[in-house]
Every structure is written in structure tokens, then in C-alpha cells.
Image (spheres, grey):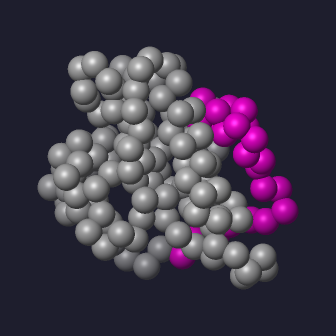
Amino acid sequence: MPLTIIEAELEHLDQVTPLFDAYRRFYRQAADEASARIFIKERLHNRDSLILLALSDEPLRPLGFTQLYPAFSSVRMRPLWILNDLFVTPEARGQGVGRRLMEAARRRAGQAGMVALVLATEKNNTSAKALYEKLGYELDTAFDYYELALGK
């Protein structure tokens, strides 16, 4: 499928917002495009995440995105990116869009001097896990990850 992957800017807010809202709905969150728009606008305005946007060439329409957040590895004393979000529209799935977004994230991380890309997904997300493993991601069996919810 002919497509272009770009780094999203504020001018792409209308294209990223519905994708981000659909991503959240995939993870069983209530639809809330207005709040999704505010959240993405803040990320783009503050430049505290990198959003890669996949656009079809003909006709021009958004097909998916990935969002990367900066972090650091204290043990390695180097920066890394958290590949926090990956979403491909249902009609574009199975056509290599997710793979292309993941490869673009890997290239950008390398160019930016990141020591690693890290990600998490639900245990039952078998299609995503198969893609990650195909691309060389390894399941971490040495550490358990915990979360402490702090309210809404």
C-alpha cells in the first residue's frame, strides 16, 4: 500500500485526533474526541512526545499512528523512547501499515541516539505481539512491571 509517514505537527491535529480516540476505544475507554484533541494538541504544542502519522498517498487520508515518549535508562545512563501507542485503522490492517510505523520509529530512535525502544501491550494482543517479535523486540522476562493508580 502506497503511504507516507510524517512527524505530526499541530497542523495534523485533525488527522491524529480521531485515530487517538479510536486507539483509546480499542483499550475499552469511552469515546471522547474532545478530550483526545486537547491531549494530542498539548503533546504536539509542548513537543513532549513524537507522533508518527501514516497517510495514504491516494486519496490522502490517515491510516495509523505511533506515539513515542522520552525517558531515560538509569542503568545504561542513556535516553530511550517508550513506544506508548500504535494504532492502525481497521480497514488498513494487514497491509503493512503497523510494520512501517514501527520501522519508522526504529529509524527515528536511532537517529536521535536512543539506547532502546520499549513498549507494553495487553497479554492477549496476539497480532501486535507477533509483529513486535517479528521486528526483533524481545519479551522481558527478567522484570515485573507494576502500576500504582493515582486517581482518574
Quadrant assignment, res 60:
top left
Pick the front one: 76 or 84: 76
Q: Position of residue 114 (x, y in %)?
A: 65, 65
Depicted 93 relative to depicted 26: above or below: above
Most extreme residue toward the right is 142
The answer to whether residue 134 is magenta is yes
**Residue visible at 26% across and 69% down?**
45
Q: Position of residue 110 (x, y in %)?
A: 64, 56
Most extreme residue toward the front is 111
**Residue visible at 73% across and 45% down?**
137
Pick the front one: 136 or 146: 136
Depicted 72 relative to depicted 81: above or below: below
Quadrant assignment, res 136:
top right
The quarter of the image holding the C terminus is bottom left
Q: Is residue 141 left or right of residue 133?
A: right
Q: Is residue 112 visible?
A: yes
Q: Is residue 24 visible?
A: no
Q: Which residues are magenta?
A: 127-148
Q: Position of residue 1 (x, y in %)?
A: 44, 17
Q: Position of residue 50 (x, y in %)?
A: 43, 59
The answer to whether residue 108 is magenta is no
